Amino acid sequence: MRRTERSEACGLARFFTSRRGRRRTQCAALLLGAGFALTTCGPGEPPPAGTVIVNARVLDGSGDQSRDVNVRIEGDRIAAVGDFEPAAGDTVVDAGGLVLAPGFIDVHSHHDSRLFELPEALAAVNQGITTIVAGQDGGHQYPLGEFFGRLDATPVAVNVASYTGFGTLREEVMGEDYQRHATPDEVAAMSDLLRGELEAGALGLSSGLEYDPGSFSATEEVVELARVAASHGGTYISHIRSEDRFFWEAIEEIIRIGREADLPVQVTHMKLAMNSWWGQAERLLTRLDEARASGVEITADIYPYRAWSTSFTWLTTVFPDRDLDRRDGAEYILRDLLSPDDVLLPDFLPEPAYNGLTLAEIAEVRGSDVETTLMDLLKADTEMGSESLMIGFAMDEPDIEAIMAWPHAVICSDGGLDGSHPRGFGAFTRFLGHYVRERNVVSLEEGIRKMTSLSAEHLGITDRGSIAEGHYADLVLFDPETVIDRSTYEDPHLPSAGIEKVWVNGEVVFDGGETTGNRPGRVIRR
């Protein structure tokens, strides 16, 4: 055995043997099978130095009560959890009675955008996120192998996993001729591309069926591709075909996809985003429970805000035939979907003077009615390339809380590194501070589970999401009494309060309110 191999085996033997000398037989067998000899460290080969976190309330991600135990990190893994003393040479971190939890997993993230420009990922790590899951809403970094290869070569501060986007595949195969159902040959071509992305490590298939080009697809297309994902052990996550007018039909569609493709499905950023549906969370959750009872493994994720954010010109899809001269379309939007006070334009590119104003305020400035103003603004933005964003305050708090409390719902941000919605910097800390501590929607133990182990389970990610021996050392130390988001719609890039320290793969990436410059993030492949 070479010296490097012996040193590694020495450390592993120490790791898999308790301080009372009891051999963990199953793990030992794995080491022996890998060709390592489980010997004690000889003279001149002391145990590797590690980091030991002491005086922490450890919430391990399981939903169980906290434990007053120490956590030892060696390299990128958790080496021990329990009642033990730091060894000579160890770095000791005194948690001062704060909570130590697994690093948070953002199951629906857009933090991959500009990740190579902002590799320290302040938006994510300041709220305790250690793993982001990209490739959402039907779009992904294509080809995925090249994206992952670049991350391998130039690591960033957080771990990155990704889905394959149905819309991206549709665009690759159908080009600009997408306003129709795909032919069998085109579906076969998309399936071939999907297989390649799954082999590159994609977690499964994502869709954004409310957006072009996926909005023109037949359900049968999605089912066929979902079957491909299922055959590779993948899952399906969807921004469903409608979150407002045709919401209930869209819920039935994803249930059908899960049943016919026989794979786990997730309604992403689940919401009741239409005034007419407010108060019907119980109806929704009852239907999902019925689907689960029938054998469809359906789950959900949610971000902790009343407002969504998307392209401003998405509203054109609500107009009959997408005709922006149809005043009845504007009337419908402002009557049944959003009030004029609930449409916020953070960065309206055709007229920057409107930045940060609501539709009602812009109409007043223009001396026009809100319906005409909406149609005129949409036409102007369309002519400039549909680049402006909008924020719509479309959800009701009781519905948000009911969905959060559903046992099969987890937390996401749907945020970006430099976006205009405060969720990019504050989703997880808002959940902990507002919904867990202040509103008592779920217990702290259950809240942590919804951000860690349950998320990992939904994604099919192993060795992360729990504080357990052998798992990767993705950890967050925070104060449950002060943790809260500080980002706002006026200033969406304000860092959170109460997050003290964040480790990714054993290295500190956020400490004392600042990023450290370390970039230990890994690609997580299915």
Image (spheres, grey):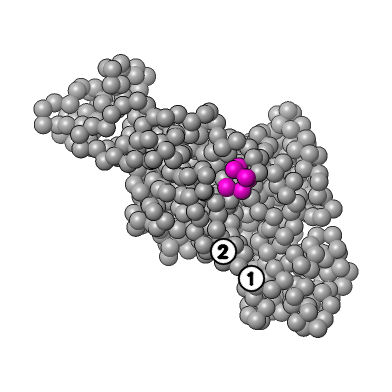
For the question of whether residue 142 can be seen, the reply is no
Depth check: give the residue in front, 109 or 52. 52
Q: Quadrant of residue 147?
A: bottom left
Q: Main secondary structure of the magenta part?
A: helix
Q: What's under tag 2, amino acid-wise?
A: Pro
Q: What's under tag 1, amino acid-wise?
A: Pro
Question: Position of 92 compared to 239: left or right?
Answer: left
Contact between labelled residues 2 and 1, with CB atoms less than 8 Å apart: yes
From this view, report whether residue 369 is shown above or below residue 71. Answer: below
Residue 507 point in image, percent of width and height: 34, 47
Instruction: Confirm whether the magenta stretch covers residue 134.
Output: no
From this view, report whether residue 483 is shown above or below residue 314. Answer: above
Residue 364 point in image, percent of width and height: 78, 79
Q: Which residue is mark 2?
A: 492
Q: Could you classify mark 2 by the number of other residues whose Cα lies within 10 Å: few (under 14), some (14-19), or many (20 or more)?
A: some
Residue at 84 percent across and 53 percent down: it is 276
For the question of whether residue 434 can be seen, the reply is yes
Q: Which residue is mark 1?
A: 346
Q: Secondary structure at mark 1?
A: strand
Residue at 51 percent across and 43 percent down: it is 480
Which label sits in the foreground, 1 or 2?
Answer: 2
